[in-house]
Every structure is written in structure tokens, then in C-alpha cells.
Amino acid sequence: MKHLLGTDTLSREDAIRILDTAGQMAATQEREMRKLPTLRGKTVVNLFFEDSTRTRISFEAAAKRLSADVINFSAKGSSVSKGESLKDTALTLQAMGADAVVVRHWASGAADRLAHGGWLHGSVLNAGDGTHQHPTQALLDAYTLRRHLIDAPTGAGLDGLRIVIVGDILHSRVAASNLYLLHTLGAKVTFVAPPTLLPIGLSAHPDLEVFYTLDEALDAHDYDAIMMLRVQRERMTGGGSAFFPSPEEYTRLYGLDKGRMDRLPDHAIVLHPGPMNRGLEISAEAADSPRSVIVEQVSNGVAVRMAALYLLLAGEEASQ
Ligand code: CP
């Protein structure tokens, strides 16, 4: 594997290898000396054309804990604002000797273009491209699900689990990446969204069940986990009014509150990729409840990104 661009092209074997390696990386982070020498001499560039808190910080932490040199590049304040193209930005990074480029971009397909444009020699890791994919988020979600819900996680998939993903699926690269990965790992996936926030392409996936209200979905099955998605108002022209009548109506039909959380089985967990709109798609009580693994998702993100960087940049050398 040279690049990590999406989960639709990730085999079950590769996905489980990343999750198992993340488990090993997480174990090293319990030690007093958390830094590993593995990527000493390698340069990782974080190339962010869109805002990020969790992904950018955790990729930086992951690369530094593997002893890589890290260059953080934000489009704001760079020559991108003077009109420099993705190609010329990539050529500049290549000239600086980037071994890996972690890219977040507002355009769907930008990571793929960087990987296959012939401008970079190193690996490309997609940190979220438009509404397309966010593979490391789906991997950290799978890692979190496996840790909580599978008895002997190492080497295992998510076979037999039933996961419901709720909210603004239309604009969610997280939902897309999760659908492919969860399916590859053997879980059953349900989407819940207003019809206006369900993309036709994704909702036609053969192994997907779809409901148009959360209560209907909760009536239909016992779920092992519920994943709430952020309402992405910045991607909705008109602030959301074209997609649902009002925030109150959205919360009434799709919001996770204590009443709905109490309808889940005792073992079920609550996930959210962040950032959250508290009071819109998730109540504070649900977000902060003992079932919530939202903060743990963030720490698991560091281990998963360490694993991805390790396998792409050192995996081949390590296995020789
Ligand atoms: N989950 C996620 O991608 O969060 P950030 O936008 O803060 O990176």
C-alpha cells in the first residue's frame, strides 16, 4: 500500500492490519517514553486547505511520536491565497523532500489527484476531501468500535455488529468512508437522514438499510453503536433552510437525546466524529454520557494515524 485515499479500495486484510498496528501503537503510548525512532529522517507534510482541529493535531502528534520531521502547511497565509495551484504547491513540497503528504482539501478528489498527478514521489494520506472520503476517521471509528464491542479484537473484524449512522449524510465524507469500511469488516449499517440529506449514490449501496426518522430506526433494530453526524451548515447554501424546515424540527426527528439513548441496548456506545453541534444533532446529556466514546475517538485517532504513517512509510522496510 503506497497511499491511503479511501476505504472503498481497502481490503479487509489491510484494514485489520492497520487496526492491529494501531493497537500496538496505542500500547507504546502507555509507556513513560512515548516517542519511537521508526520514522527518523522522514518528512511528513500536513497540507490543510480546510479547517481542522482533531485531524490536523492528531496527524502532527502521530508523526512526531514516530520521530518524523513535520511541516505544517495551512492554505490560509500561504501562496495559495495568491492563486498558486495544487500542482505548484505539490511540486514545492516535493522539492522540500516530503516523504508523505497528509492532505485535507475542500474539493472531492483532491487527494487522489495529488497521489496520481505525478508531482509527488511520496505517499499521500487523505485527511478529508470535500464530501468524498475521510479514511482515517473511519479507521479510528472502527478501532473504537472493535475495542468496545469485540471480545478478542486483535485480528478481528466487526462481524455481526449493527451500526446506525444518523444525520447529514449528504455532506459527510465520514459517512461514506464508514459505510465502505464497516461493510468490509462485516458490520451491518443503517443510515438515518431526511431525504434531502441522503445522497442517491450512497443510499443505493446493496447492503444498506435506510430510515427517514430516528424513531423508526430505533423501533426496527437493537444497535451496538450509534454514530451521530454533524449538520454541516457551512456546506448548505442558505444555512440549512433548503434541507430541513428548522433546527428544532431537525432535532425533533434526528437528534440524540436521553430518551432515545435509553432505547439502545445497555452495551451500545455513542460516537460522533466532531466537531459537535450540541443541542442540534446531539444533546449535551448524550454527548457527555457514560455511553459516549467521543473523547476516546480523538485519542484513538493518534494511534490509528501512527499506524497508517508507519505502514506507508516504514512498513515495507520493516518487513524486509
Ligand atoms: N473529525 C474531524 O475530521 O474533525 P476535524 O475537522 O476537527 O479534523
Image: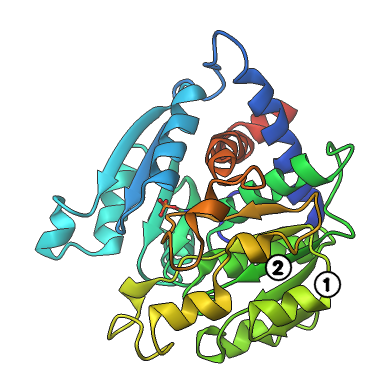
Mark 2: secondary structure? strand
Q: Describe residue 60's horizontal placement relative to residue 136 as left or right.
A: left
Is residue 8 among what the camera can see?
A: no
| Mark drawn on residue 164 | 2
Residue 105 x/y as whole percent: 36, 62
Query: x and y percent of residue 317 in the render?
Result: 65, 29
Left or right: residue 252 compared with residue 159: left
* Residue found 55% across the figure and 63% down from its top: 174
Residue 87, x across and y down, in percent:
30, 62
Distance, label 2 to label 1, CA atoms, is 9 Å
Instruction: Tell me if I can see residue 36 in this picture.
Output: yes
- The relative height of residue 167 versus residue 95 in the rendered view (above or below) is below
Looking at the image, which is closer to me, 229 or 18? 229
Which numbered dot is residue 148?
none
The residue lying at 25 percent from left, 49 percent from top is 74
The residue most toward the front is 259
Give the quarter of the figure containing the C terminus: top right
**SS for dot 1:** loop
Q: Is residue 222 left or right of residue 305?
A: right
From this viewpoint, which residue is outermost toward the top? 32
Q: Is mark 2 within 8 Å of ligand 1?
A: no
Residue type for callout 1 = His
| Residue where numbered disc 1 is placed | 221
Tell whether label 1 touches label 2 (CB within 8 Å).
yes
Give amino acid for label 2: Val
Q: Position of residue 57 (x, y in %)?
A: 39, 38
Q: How is the image coloured?
A: rainbow
Query: In which quadrant of the rendered view does residue 302 lie?
Result: top right
The residue located at (60%, 49%) in the rendering is 2
Q: Nearer the viewer, residue 307 or 265?
A: 265
